[in-house]
Image (tube, rainbow, N blue to C red):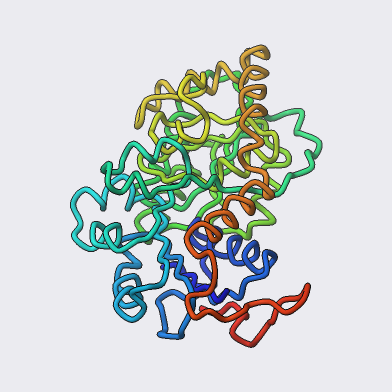
Amino acid sequence: MKISLVTPAGARSRSGNRATADRWARFLIELGHEVLVEEAWGGERSDLMIALHTRRSHSSIKRYATAHPGHPLVAVLTGTDLYRDIRFDDDAQDSLRLATRVVVLQEAGLAELEPRHREKARVIYQSAEPIRPQPQAKTFFDVCVVGNLRAEKDPFRCALAARLLPPASRVRITHAGKAQNERFAERARALASAEPRYRWLGEVPRWRVRRLLSRARLLVQTSVMEGGANAVAEALAAGVPVIASRIAGNVGMLGEDYPGYYPVGDEEALALLLEQTESDAAFHESLEARCAARRPLTLPERERGALGGLIEEVAGGSPDGQEQTQGDGVILTPWTKKRA
């Protein structure tokens, strides 16, 4: 099948939306489909559209539905649209109406949907390749924060919590993520200057994030709004335990009764959890065990299988009645190339 995959994140972006789009494109090509990744639908004919983010991709969704009313259309709720936009934004709500299927990235996301949309919703957990652990620093208790510096991520909560740790703490916090604007960058630099336990790397490539995780003892996920964080999936794949803000997107990834949650925006509670994780080996091991139990949700073969199953469910065959394969091979045309 020819599949249009629309994401609002550009080809050079290191955002979660772009990571998801690139990973899904790879899976779909492995499954024998032809995929075109674009920031906005360019009008090329396809058998199916998958669009990430109901508000930001609404124009593409609406134009595609008008041009190809009989073709399947999958809308993926990736974060702010799930926990904010679909409640108030006309474009996001219209995207849900037009979608043949709706995808959420963790199980708690289903609760945010009206019954009429929940009926056509499917859960596909995001995956990550396993990471081989590397030797950990002996003089530091290394903690990672992975996420861009913007309001929805509450990006400085871990740095603020670091100031509350006891003097003897060995916690060292490394934050990787792009600043949304200069104001966020200035705040990160100021905190790093004032707090020796905190350092901000800025935007870094994914391989470097994975290297940081391979040596980390803990990931802290501080968002106030999250559809299903790629960073949490990466941590689970790496065998790194997680401390997270208690929001639906994190609960859907880690489980309702996970012991590593703190109240959103509460650096005092976060500092206590950091101290407990560092000083209480049994607690740290309990977080590791609970994360290990959730790790199968992030296996690449599971996500690829779920995505392939969704395509089979909504499509069945080519709307044009044309074969997309020849023998055991796939007909690959220049259209197969990803571009954005």
Residue at screen point 67% across, 42% down: 213
Is residue 242 toward the left or the right of residue 57 in the image? right
Question: Who is closer to the viewer here, 172 or 93?
Answer: 93
Is residue 40 toward the left or the right of residue 136 in the image? left
Residue 106 sits above or below residue 334 on the image? above
Question: Who is closer to the viewer here, 158 or 64?
Answer: 64
Question: Who is closer to the viewer here, 131 or 173?
Answer: 131
Whole-percent x and y of residue 262?
Answer: 42, 24
Residue at screen point 41% across, 44% down: 226
Whole-percent x and y of residue 186?
Answer: 40, 54
Residue 254 visible in the displayed image = yes
Q: Residue furthest front?
A: 321
Residue 186 visible in the displayed image = no
Q: Quadrant of residue 54?
A: bottom left
Question: For the image shown, how many numbered marks are present on the structure?
Answer: 0
Question: Who is closer to the viewer here, 6 or 100?
Answer: 100
Image quarter where the N terminus lies is bottom right
Residue 288 sits above or below residue 339 on the image? above
Residue at screen point 51% across, 35% down: 253
Residue 132 sits above or below residue 103 on the image? above
Is residue 290 toward the left or the right of residue 118 in the image? right
Whole-percent x and y of residue 216?
Answer: 68, 36
Whole-percent x and y of residue 227?
Answer: 42, 46
